Image (tube, rainbow, N blue to C red):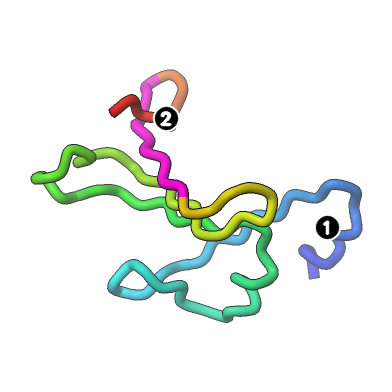
């Protein structure tokens, strides 16, 4: 109900956080949420010590109505700024 009221406002921003299945690659839940969203992204943490990106967070843009999709941005945690784009 709150989302229905918010979308009537000019330029609303609504963030819906869902979860993925155990394999970590499929959305777990109602597909209508995924289809209604303008942007669908996965934020994950790389735990594989053998990879160059170990310890970084990756933001995988899977759907974007306003720009390109299929982009992966690697992020690192900065003490002052929080998440910042990593320079690999």
What residue appears at the point 46 percent right and 76 percent down from the top-left corner? Answer: 28
The x, y position of residue 12, in whole percent, is 80, 50
Q: Which residues are magenta?
A: 71-79
* In the depicted structure, whether residue 41 falls above or below residue 52: below
Near-viewer residue (33 or 53): 53
Along the horizontal axis of the image, is 3 left or right of 19? right
Residue 6's label in the rendered image is: 1
In reply to whether residue 55 is colored magenta, the answer given is: no
Nearest to N terminus: mark 2 or mark 1: 1
The x, y position of residue 85, in whole percent, is 42, 30
Q: Main secondary structure of the magenta part?
A: strand
The x, y position of residue 50, in whole percent, is 9, 45
* In the depicted structure, whether residue 12 falls above or below residue 5: above
Q: How many numbered marks are there?
A: 2
The x, y position of residue 19, in whole percent, is 45, 67
Along the horizontal axis of the image, is 27 left or right of 39? left
């Amino acid at each position: 109900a709150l989302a229905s009221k918010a979308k009537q406002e000019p330029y609303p921003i609504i963030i819906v956080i869902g979860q993925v299945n155990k394999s970590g690659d499929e959305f777990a839940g109602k597909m209508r949420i995924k289809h209604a969203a303008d942007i669908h992204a996965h934020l994950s943490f790389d735990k594989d010590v053998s990879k160059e990106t170990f310890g970084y967070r990756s933001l995988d843009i899977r759907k974007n109505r306003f720009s390109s999709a299929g982009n992966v941005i690697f992020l690192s945690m900065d003490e002052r700024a929080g998440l910042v784009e990593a320079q690999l």
